[in-house]
Every structure is written in C-alpha cells, then in structure tokens.
Image (cartoon, helix red, strand yellow):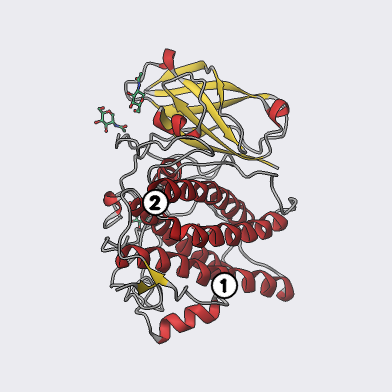
Amino acid sequence: MLKTLASVVLLSTSVAIAAPWGGSQQFGGKPHPPPGFFPSHGDHGKFGGHGYGSGNGSGQVPFTFPLANGFPNIKNPSPALTQIEKQAHGTLPNTPLSPTLQTGDNTIFELIAFNELFEVAFFTSLINNITQGVEGFEIGSPVVKNFVLNALITVQAQEELHALGANGILTAAGETPIQPCEYIFPSADFDSAIGFARTFTDVVLGTLQDALAGLAANGDEEYIPLIGSIIGQEGEQNGYYRSLLDLVPSELPFLTRSKAQFAFSVLNQDVVVPGSCPNSNIIDLPIFGALKVLAENIKGKDQQLEFSFTNNGTDTDSISLVYINQQNLPIVEKPTIISEKDGVVTFEAFFPFSKFIMNGLTIAVVTNDSGPFDTVDEVADATLFGPGLIEVN
Ligand SMILES: *[C@@H]1O[C@H](CO)[C@@H](O)[C@H](O)[C@H]1NC(C)=O
Ligand SMILES: *[C@@H]1O[C@H](CO)[C@@H](O)[C@H](O)[C@H]1NC(C)=O
Ligand SMILES: *[C@@H]1O[C@H](CO)[C@@H](O)[C@H](O)[C@H]1NC(C)=O
Ligand SMILES: *[C@@H]1O[C@H](CO)[C@@H](O)[C@H](O)[C@H]1NC(C)=O
C-alpha cells in the first residue's frame, strides 16, 4: 500500500544530515556509479571564502535538538505538525509515497534530510538571536525587525517540513530516517549569518541539481517534480538573502552545479560537531579533507588566490586545483606551492574571473588528476580536498 508523506508516522528520533545524491548523471552524459567511500576527515574548513571561523575552537555551545515543539520527532497527524504547517504557509504533500527507492536514491534523501536538519538548527538559532537581541544580532527598527523575523520564521517551518518530508520518503521506503547532529555556526552577527545562509543555500541549489540527475539515472522519476519545487523554494529564499546583502536577487543565468560529496563534506567540515551524529555514518558519501580559501572578500577580477590543506601523504607535485562555476566545464589550474610546514600545505592558483565571468558560487577542489574533466562527476571522483567555497557578487 502506498503511504503518503502526510500519513507516514515520522518515527521518533530525529533527522540529521542529508544523504548523498546517488549515482549521478551529467546533463546529457552517462550515468556514473557512486564513488567509493574514501574517508579523509578534514578537521575544520571554512564554509565560504569569507573568513568564517569554524570548529569548536570558537567556544560556542553547540545547538542541539529537539526543538520546543518536539521536532524532529513529529507525529503525523498531530497538533504539532499542523502548527508547523500553518507557520510554513502550507502542508506536506498528501500524494502517495513510493514503498521502495532505487539503489542510490536512499542516499539522495538521506543527504537532503541531513542538510535540512542543519538548516532548521541554523534558522532556529538565528531567530532566537534576533528575538533576544543577542549582541551583533540587534535590529533597532521594530518595523525592520518584524519584516526580517516574519520571513525567517516562515523559512524555519518550511525547512522543518523539508526535513520531515525527506525522512518521510525514507521511512515509507523502509529506509532509516536520518537523525540530527549537534551544530555550531560560523556566524557571529546578523550580516555574517545572512552571508552564510546565502552560501549554504547556493550549495544546496547546486546539490539538488545532482539529486535530480541521480533520481533520473536511478529510476525514481516520481520524485523529480518534488525536488524541482524545493529548488524553486530555496531560490526564493536566496533572492531574499542576497537582497539583504545588497546584491541583485538573481545570482547567475545558470546556477553553479555541485555534487552530493561536496555538500556532505562541507557540512561535516564546518557545522557538524565531530562525533555528534547518531547515524550519519549510513550515508554512503565520502568526507574529503578540508580545503581552506585564505582570501576574504574576493573581488570579481583575475587574481591569484591562496588556499591551504592539511596534507596526509599526498604528493603535492601531482595535484591540481579545479574550479566549478555555473554550468561550465570544470576549470583546471596548476597550483604553485608556497609552503609546506607541519603538514599544512599552502599554495596559490590563478582565478580566471574575466574569461568565464565567474560570479556567484565557485566550488574549488584539489584533485589528483589534471583532467581535462568533461563533467563535475569526474571531478568529484578525483577530489582529495574540498570544497573551498568562493563567492563573488
Ligand atoms: C590519513 O591517511 C590515513 C591512511 O590513508 C587514513 O587512515 C586517515 O584517516 C587519514 N587522515 C586524515 C585526517 O585524512
Ligand atoms: C564546544 O565548546 C562548548 C563551549 O566551550 C562546550 O560546551 C562543548 O562541549 C564543546 N563541544 C565539543 C564537541 O567539544
Ligand atoms: C547566535 O549567537 C551565538 C552567540 O553569539 C552564536 O554563537 C551563533 O553562531 C549565532 N547563531 C547564528 C545562526 O548565527
Ligand atoms: C585519486 O584519488 C581518488 C580518490 O581518492 C582515488 O580513487 C584514485 O585512485 C586516485 N588516483 C590516483 C591516480 O592517485
């Protein structure tokens, strides 16, 4: 019997991280098998090229679930779910859910759940900070404060439904729902929080493209429209964050492509408290070593950019730096090693802004292959460190 999102009882526990988008397919390309699991834990990377601190060195008290309403342990139906839906201005879909998922597609919904749980944590923390007037988050004007809170409170509930929806799809298919981790955030004031929201939403917008490719390649087309609806929804959010940051709402003609591996890696590197995830280990995705972008406030011009990573036996003569921007072919640059000290490799690489008009999100990774790469899938398969996230305009 088919279950619906609205009828699945979302079992206890929580949701955590998102799953990997399974075997993926490039636009017009051939399906690729999911990459093998090659653990190489980056300690702490930077979520974005904006100098966000990360890790627990910040002395932050980690964010923990459940929320006051019990989330992510929300029964369906229940007064708590109805309340979330009212706050979200809409409902979980009541259409039937598939009793099975094709191999690899469980990973897609696991990664979505993993990511959406983090997003709920982030927006809950941000709303609390603004409401309580935490230093750096005070908004003086009552009108502006209401304007911002109104949007964020709606988004927070919408993200709760995205997380419950992904875990509902997993549960209906007999898969294990993802439980939440503990989180820390790299933002310490309102502006950096909105900047961070803009960057992680960009990563989500790129990664959901990978989800669509995976669902199509693996054969769960029934969920493609649902994911399409979420891509539009996250795009609406990002237009709002960009406007708050005094950027034009629409970032690029064709948004930057990402891969499940990159999203999973950066969440684990930058916001997840190490060891705090009850079951994210079931998500069949690698966590790459962290790649730090050392430049801040990167301008839209040709320039050398500095990066660093903690080496773990990699022959630095054979590495390449690969940029992924928009829907263009991956750009391969040869790094120039600046120093290698106490295992930390610092290098620079050219950022060819003007040739490709590299606005918006650029994903930078270190590979052990100099390409040329026809697809982002090929880049992910050769990645050792990353992603470094660069934002221009
Ligand atoms: C370093 O490499 C070893 C051997 O390949 C691996 O077991 C370990 O997890 C790696 N550590 C990091 C931090 O990447
Ligand atoms: C992170 O730091 C906070 C504040 O010092 C502490 O309460 C928490 O236990 C730390 N978490 C981890 C995982 O070290
Ligand atoms: C909320 O404020 C705390 C304390 O300053 C900070 O550590 C945390 O990162 C803030 N949350 C967000 C989402 O920025
Ligand atoms: C490059 O790295 C990938 C991922 O770790 C690995 O599967 C592959 O064997 C490596 N290739 C070479 C030539 O070292």
Three-letter amino acid code at the position of disc 1: Ile
Q: Which mark is residue 125?
A: none
Q: Quadrant of ligand 2?
A: bottom left
Q: CA distance from mark 1 to mark 2?
A: 36 Å
Q: Nearer the viewer, mark 1 or mark 2?
A: 2
- Assign the C terminus to one quadrant of the image: top right
- Describe the element under mark 1 as helix, strand or loop: helix
Q: Quadrant of residue 121?
A: bottom left
- Of the pair 141 and 228, the residue shown nearer to us: 228
Q: Is residue 287 left or right of residue 128?
A: left
Q: Quadrant of residue 385?
A: top left
- Describe the element under mark 2 as helix, strand or loop: loop
- Of the pair 67 and 375, the residue shown nearer to us: 375
In the image, residue 63 sits, relative to residue 352, either above or below, namely below
Return the residue found at the far top. 317
Q: Which residue is mark 2?
A: 219
In the image, residue 196 sits, relative to residue 342, either above or below, namely below
How far from the left and from the top, in percent, is residue 148? 66, 69
In the image, residue 119 sits, relative to residue 284, either above or below, namely below
Three-letter amino acid code at the position of disc 2: Gly
- Assign the N terminus to one quadrant of the image: bottom left
How far from the left and from the top, in percent, is residue 13? 29, 69
Instruction: Specify few, some or many for label 2: CA neighbours under 10 Å numbering under 14, 14-19, or 20 or more.
Output: some
Return the residue found at the far bottom. 79
Q: Which residue is mark 1?
A: 153
Whether residues under marks 1 and 2 lie with C-beta atoms below 8 angstroms apart, the answer is no
How far from the left and from the top, in percent, is residue 156? 52, 69
Which residue shows up at 37% across the image and 70% down it? 72
